[in-house]
Amino acid sequence: MVRSGNLNQKTEFKGGGNVKTLIVSTVVPEGKYAPWIYISSIVQNISKYSEVKFWFSILNEDIQVKNDFIINTIKKTLLPLKLKSFLKNHYVTHYYHREHLNSLEEVLKSFQPDVVVFANLPSASYLHDVKKNKMNIYTVLLQHNVEYVVMKDLSKYGRSFFHRIYYDFQKRFIRNFERKIMSNVDFIISISPSDKEYFVRNYGIPADKVEVIRPIFEYEKNLFNAKSSDEKNISFISSFNWYPNVEGAIFFVKNVFPKLLRKFPKIKLYLVGRDPEKRILELQERYPENVIVTGTVESVETYYRMSNCVVIPIFIGPGIKLKVLEAMASGVPTVMTSYVARDYDLLNEGFCIADRPEEFVHHIERILEDHDYARIISKRQIEWYESYLSNEKEKLRVVLERIFSEVNKKR
């Protein structure tokens, strides 16, 4: 089914200049959905240089629309998709729909874009169809992760034996698909420095073809309330159906939390986030008086405000971790691993970095006991966040200047 519509969201994309850009996306455009926020922040800046139109190909979504986007939806049963996926690329079987090709050809013909931006790797399954309709088009890929690494990790950390077998079978398809797409687009915007390094080292992508634009998210700032009281609250704010977060929470409760309990018997650990797996719920069962699993919450800001300390004990998973940026903006003193700190250039900058259990304990104890130190860390985090936003916005401007300069040379 094809519908034209503008989804209920506040972001406006007002086109400028005489260049036309088509955004091809399989990402559901929901206002609070992190991939969509990342895409929106980039497209808002693209719209300063170009007229913008969106074309969506979305599976099994009941979307209410108004007037601006071209929305293509399709409903299929889950079982046939899974069976087909064992024989073919997961992204092609789930996100590429021949039923939508007439719609794509129509918008390419009527809009005549100079640039096509693929909003994520799955949307680039339409790359061939775009290029065969307009061979001189300039193509850009927004790359949110190393998708092969996601598949590889899920083959180890998947929820069930079936899932692990499925992802183990899929990873070779995804690696070949990812490398092929990245080799055939004209330009790539990567979300993290470590991802770019992987693409250059493992896929042979030229370094000057990839630029890193980290998330430009406007989070609520200065939520920390440093107070002297017996109440000690730690929070790990994340989504607990995603394997890096699940493994991180298990590591923290197993290796760090018992040591903190010996010194702070009334301490509370809040695991805040949607769809907690069974293994997360079991952590609460282990410490029913001290570990609270919230599930989906209306506002994470409430938990930042009540926390003395935030922890991010993550050691695996590709891409940049948005929870780091959110925690830094909040000003709540944050203890994180070097693994998540590296992509934000936070190492050796006076922040609380911990990789071993005793390092987590040391930083958390100091934050809980030394309120002056906690305030210093809080102020440092907020100052860093404000500088980060300014720098990333300027970098995005420079990258888009480069892209549209290349486009104008081809016209």
Image (tube, rainbow, N blue to C red):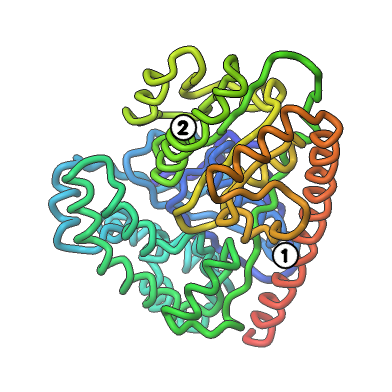
Compare marks 1 and 2 and give the one earlier in the sequence. 2
Q: Please state the horizontal and vertical placement of residue 124, each as a whole percent of the image.
A: 41, 65
Is 401 above or below relative to 245? Answer: below
Residue at (46% x, 82% y) in the render: 135
Element assignment for label 2: helix
Front position among marks 1 and 2: 2
Numbered label attached to residue 252: none
Quarter of the image containing the C terminus? bottom right
Residue at (42% x, 79% y) in the render: 203
Q: Residue type at mark 2?
A: Val
Residue at (19% x, 56% y) in the render: 85
Left or right? Give the position of 291 relative to 375. Answer: left
- The answer to which of 401 and 62 lies nearer the viewer is 401
- The answer to which of 203 and 290 lies nearer the viewer is 290
Left or right? Give the position of 1 relative to 299. Answer: left
Quarter of the image containing the N terminus? top left
Q: Residue furthest front?
A: 262
Residue at the disc numbered 1: 396
Numbered label attached to residue 253: 2
Say if residue 248 shows up in the picture. yes
Q: Residues within 10 Å of mark 1 (few under 14, many from 20)?
A: many
Residue at (13% x, 51% y) in the render: 83
